[in-house]
Amino acid sequence: MIDSLDFPHGTPRGYDLGCHGRAACPGVITCTRARERYSGDYTYMKRVQAGLTPAEIVAVELADASAAKAARLAAKQRAWRASKPKPVTVLPTPRVVGPTTRRPKRYLLPPERINHGTTYGYNSGCHKDSPCPKPDGETCWDAIHAYQVKQGRANGVKERIPPEHGTPGGYRVFACHAKSVCPSETSGGKSCTTAMAEYRKANRPSRAKPTMEKAA
């Protein structure tokens, strides 16, 4: 009987015994499909003749498909590596030994030839980490610093004011975001939070729409 528990569903013999329905067959594969494969698939026919159950045949086919997919992927990777150009080893250029045409440096003069206390002395090698032999007056570092400040002011760079409480700088640098703990607020002045709010309000871009002139 087709409905019995020992009926060979999913096999060519099940088809021969009368199981011809595709939707009602409870096998791993239908008996109709098993008969079709048995007639046209030599590998499937040999596995059926070897006594493998339908579930075992499906498991073997899934393992074979996974191995074939892995082999195809490995072949593609080998072909991709073979198509990549091999790196070319570039030998370093031999160093030229002998006189060169490079212009000699104008600094690092002997200490007795350096005019200390000037920017020329700094450019000649008297830096901050080296003791300047001019203890009285301006050192080479002071001279180059004053020169850089002068050039910055001439180029429009403003003087940097140290941050204080009660200013936008104190709000940013000191992270003074509470009015109750701001030293400027407790002493009767303006807090950093209030100063930052005023600064943002004064520098906020105007969102007013331009008024169009009425046609005469």
Image: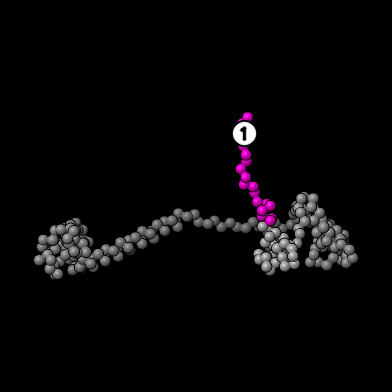
Q: The residue tagged with tag 1: helix, strand or loop?
A: loop
Q: In this view, does 37 lie to the left or right of 164?
A: left
Viewport quadrant of the C terminus = top right
| Residue drawn where x is 60% and y is 57% of the image | 91
**Residue sticking out furthest to the right:** 136
User: Disc 1 designates what residue?
Assistant: 214
Q: Tell me which residue sits at (83%, 61%) in the image.
A: 142
> Residue placed farthest to the bottom in the image?
6
What residue sits 72% from the left and 62% below the top?
190
The chosen color scheme is one colour
- Residue 58 coordinates in the image, percent (x, y): 25, 64
With respect to residue 213, does 29 lie above or below?
Answer: below
In the image, 39 versus 159, the foreground residue is: 159
In this rendering, the count of numbered labels is 1
**61 left or right, relative to 180:** left
Label 1 environment density (alpha carbons within 10 Å; few <14, some 14–19, many ≥20): few
Q: In this view, does 173 lie to the left or right of 53?
A: right
Please state which of residues 110 and 23 is positioned toward the viewer in this rendering.
23
Residue 146, percent across and down? 82, 57
Query: Which residue is drawn at the image coordinates 15% and 66% (left, top)?
Result: 8
The magenta stretch spans residue 52: no
- In the rendered image, which quarter is residue 43 located in? bottom left
Quarter placement of the N terminus: bottom left
User: Where, by quadrant of the figure, is residue 60 drawn?
Assistant: bottom left
Q: Position of residue 23 (x, y in %)?
A: 18, 58
Nearer to us in this view, 107 or 26: 26
Type of amino acid at the residue the image marks with label 1: Lys
- Please provide the residue range marked out in magenta: 198-216
Mark yes or no: residue 70 visible: yes
Judge whether residue 103 can be spotted in this image.
no
Q: Position of residue 159 (x, y in %)?
A: 77, 56
